[in-house]
């Protein structure tokens, strides 16, 4: 590999590293689903910020597996009928913080 190619590769890696929205601490997040106080707080935050799309009872939006006319997916349920439970904690955290 030529030196300039190596330089371009290195620059790309540096740009990627600094533009990557997720830092390592965030990627190592673990949800505290067994701490009652955290769950209670989450319930209130959910009701205020998430229930409008994901449903008051976590049921999600109708036909959530089908893309709309603009190509977007509706909000999926967060109960056992969806697939949220299937994802690792870090994915759920990053998805909530930064979006799709
Ligand atoms: C304006 C509507 C809206 C609100 C409000 C909203 N979401 Fe979502 N959410 C969506 C949509 C739409 C998707 C699916 C995006 C996709 O897959 O393309 C989604 C996906 C998710 C996912 C990924 C689920 C999976 O199984 O892949 C998580 C986790 C999530 N939302 C959490 C939250 C949380 C937590 C809140 C509140 C803090 C919230 N969302 C508020 C619309 C919303």
Image (spheres, helix red, strand yellow):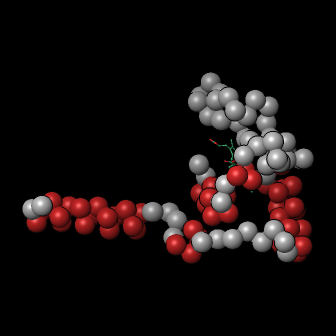
Does the rendering let one see residue 8? yes
The residue under the point 62% across, 24% down is 69
In the picture provided, is 36 more to the left or to the right than 89?
right
Farthest-out residue, front? 86
Farthest-out residue, left? 2
Q: Please, is residue 53 above or below residue 40 in the view?
A: above
Front residue of 81/10: it is: 81
**Quadrant placement of the N terminus:** bottom left
Q: Position of residue 79 (x, y in %)?
A: 83, 48
Front residue of 94/2: it is: 2
Farthest-out residue, top? 69
The residue under the point 31% across, 64% down is 13
Place residue 43 in its image quadrant.
Answer: bottom right
Front residue of 81/13: it is: 81
Q: Please, is residue 15 above or below residue 35 in the view?
A: above
* Count of numbered circles on the image: 0
Q: Position of residue 91 (x, y in %)?
A: 62, 58
Place residue 89 in its image quadrant.
Answer: bottom right
The residue under the point 65% across, 35% down is 73
In the picture provided, is 91 more to the left or to the right than 18?
right
Q: Position of residue 9 (x, y in %)?
A: 23, 61
Q: Position of residue 47 (x, y in %)?
A: 86, 55
Does the rendering let one see residue 41? no
In the picture provided, is 89 more to the left or to the right than 77?
left
Q: Please, is residue 82 above or below residue 32 in the view?
A: above
């Amino acid at each position: 590999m030529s030196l300039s190619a190596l330089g371009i590769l290195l620059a790309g890696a540096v740009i990627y590293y600094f533009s990557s929205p997720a830092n390592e601490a965030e990627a190592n997040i673990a949800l505290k689903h067994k701490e009652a106080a955290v769950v209670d707080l989450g319930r209130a935050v959910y009701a205020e910020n998430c229930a409008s799309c994901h449903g008051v009872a976590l049921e999600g939006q109708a036909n959530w597996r089908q893309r709309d006319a603009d190509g977007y997916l509706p909000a999926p349920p967060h109960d056992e009928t969806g697939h949220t439970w299937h994802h690792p904690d870090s994915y759920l955290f990053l998805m909530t913080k930064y979006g799709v």
